[in-house]
Image (cartoon, grey):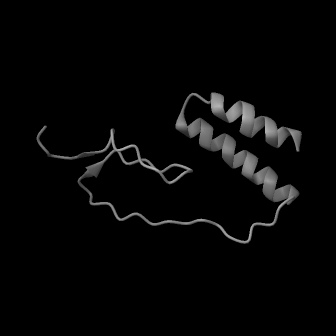
Amino acid sequence: NQEYDRLVLDVAPRAKTHEERMAIFTQAEQMLMDDLPVLPIYTYTTKHLVHPSVKNIANNIMDQQSYREIYLEGAED
């Protein structure tokens, strides 16, 4: 599907925000599921237990964290 390729390869990488990028990937994933050129037999899932004082953790599609932005609320520098 050329529209799927365009969204994933051209549009998503140019998205200005994480939210915009995720919306584009959601749209592309829906196209993939509607066309069903592949039949997924496994979907990766994960759970993260995070203490409430841990701030600025962001989930992402690769399940990788950028520890540079994470901090503990109330912790001294």
Along the horizontal axis of the image, is 75 left or right of 58? left
Q: Against 11, is 48 above or below?
A: below
Identified at 88% across, 45% down, the residue is 1
Q: In which quarter of the image is residue 23?
A: top right
- Counting from the top left corner in percent of width and height, residue 11 is at 71, 31
Of all residues, the one furthest to the left in this rendering is 76
Measured as percent of width and height from the top left, residue 68 is found at 33, 39
Query: Up-down: is 48 above or below 68?
Result: below
Q: Residue at x 47, y 50 (%)?
A: 64
Q: Which residue lies furthest to the bottom in this view?
A: 41
Q: Where is residue 31 in the image (x, y as percent from the top left)?
A: 81, 50
Q: Is residue 9 left or right of residue 56?
A: right
Q: Pick whichever, 67 or 20, lies toward us.
A: 67
Which is more toward the observer, 43 or 16? 43
Horizontal arrangement in the rendering, residue 2 relative to residue 56 (left or right): right
Q: Quadrant of the C terminus?
A: top left
Q: In which quarter of the image is residue 43?
A: bottom right
Give the number of callouts. 0
Placement of 50 over or under 26, stated as above or below: below
Residue at (54% x, 38% y) in the render = 18
Q: Which residue is drawn at 35% across and 65% down?
A: 49
